[in-house]
Amino acid sequence: MKTTTTVTKNQVLTLEIIDLSYEGLGVAKVDGYSLFVSNALPEEKVEAVVTKVGRKYGFAKTLKIIKKSPYRVENFEQKYVQTGIAPLIHLAYPQQLQFKQQQVINNLSKQGLDSGLVQEIIGADEQFHYRNKAQIPVRTVAGQATTGFFRSRSHDLVALDDYLIQDPQIDTLINQIRDLCREIGLKGYDELHNRGEIRHIMVRRAYFTGEMMVVLVVTSKKTKLLPQLLQQLAQKPEITSLYVNVNSKKTNVILGSRFELVAGQEYITDQILGHQFRISPQSFYQVNPVQTQKLYQLALEAAQLQGDELVVDAYCGIGTIGICLANQAREVVGIEVVEAAVHDAQTNAAINNVHNARFIQGKTETVLAQWAQEKQAVDVLIVDPPRKGLDASLIASIRALKPQRIVYISCNPATLARDLQLLEADYQAQKVTPVDMFPLTKHVESVIALERK
Ligand SMILES: C[S@@+](CC[C@H](N)C(=O)[O-])C[C@H]1O[C@@H](n2cnc3c(N)ncnc32)[C@H](O)[C@@H]1O
């Protein structure tokens, strides 16, 4: 039951932060009411002065925190919160990390797992401008093509020039393409009437080589003014690869199924841990190139390879993890559902002189169910699934295949905890290491080593 109160205006209260809750804000309880304090850590004590007392029950209606916040939320930053680009911008970086670490701990605890396994989160050196990929909507605002981000849970475009977390060279290129659309008279997409010409601009920039890929998502290839834009972009030396993707459907899905190369190469090339990787427009590629190397290093350590193992790299994308560890294993088999990514993986093995890796196109759950039936031997299994985690049937196949070790790379602590709980009868988690791949957002990645009991 809530106790009603005794506070008076100007009274100084000491708020004891008991938890990090809503979007990483510290929670303190005063007279049974929750108060949220930014930039505070659990067990911290924060001084606050009562500025207004609620009339009905006399509780502290507004409080002013006396401790100065190390991070100010200024007006211009609100748009990065409203658009979901940087929902944690109100938190100083150590508090962001603490929030993310707590997410992993809370999810494990909820499933009755040992949260003591959670190691200190690996932070990033760069909080801003780290993303190597952007998919930016183009709409017509006040009669001209405008680029930006949608306000959360809406399709109202907030116009932006600086996207805060993207590579600044990507921002520059997007702004240049937007300006060219304005000059030429190309219109942004009108989703209500399924009209207009340019729907999205997708840009990827390879961090280590500087190569850039542009995909213009258009409503029709026959748009009269489109060739003018393509011609101008084809002359830009910084664009290594230029594609058009046609999406004529009335849908929220960004990309259509058809990609047409307009100029340059079919791919861009980047490097990870000294290996070269070609990336096609349809393929998944990690978005934070600096943190990716730390993530993969952890995965390689967790695999503890001796040189004679058959390693399955499930959900392998363009083959990055398998190729980075191939020289420590007998054989690597990658499994990936997207055909273009499998082709990239095969090419990537060849250009890195990796001869003991092969890649299968298919769903991990289907391929490994077949392997389980055939009683094929797997020594080490690496899984790096999308946010929904592992399919229930895949868990059953893993238990039948009995790999000695599993390395689980997860981008969603809730599905990770669910899956660890399902594997618990046969596998002991050794440690769980969170990695901050996406500073300023609520997302957290983790690497987990599991050993067969
Ligand atoms: C989180 S990404 C990881 C890719 C890669 N390990 C990396 O680090 O770049 C997940 C990948 O799994 C693929 N994928 C999604 N569902 C799949 C499934 N059921 N079976 C195999 N691959 C799948 C996606 O296309 C994507 O390439």
Image (tube, rainbow, N blue to C red):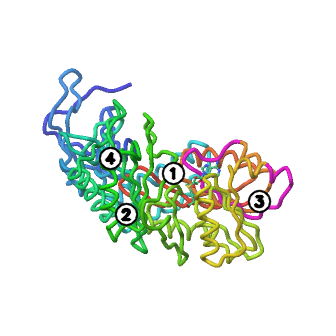
Q: Quadrant of residue 130?
A: bottom left
Residue of label 3: 403
Question: Which comes sooner in the sequence, label 4 or label 1?
Answer: 1
Label 2: which secondary element:
loop
Q: Is mark 2 within 8 Å of ligand 1?
A: no
- Helix, strand or loop at mark 3: loop
- Residue 130, labelled with which disc? 2
Q: Position of residue 153 (x, y in %)?
A: 36, 35
Frontmost of labels 2 and 3 is: 2
| Mark 4 or 2, closer to the camera | 4
The stretch in magenta equals 370-392
In the structure shown, which secondary structural element does the residue marked by tag 4 occupy?
loop
Report the image quarter containing ligand 1: bottom right
Q: CA distance from mark 4 to mark 3?
A: 57 Å
Q: Which residue is mark 4?
A: 224
What's the residue type where badge 2 is placed?
Tyr
Give residue 104's mark.
1
The mark lying in front, picked from 4 and 1, is 4
Give the label on residue 271, or none: none
User: Can residue 128 be seen here?
Assistant: no
Decide if residue 324 is in sight here.
yes
- Name the amino acid, label 4: Lys
Majority SS type along the magenta span: loop
Residues at marks 4 and 2, CA–CA distance in whole angstroms: 36 Å
| Figure check: 30 above or below 284 | above
Q: Residues within 10 Å of mark 3 (few under 14, many from 20)?
A: many
Q: Position of residue 143 (x, y in %)?
A: 19, 40
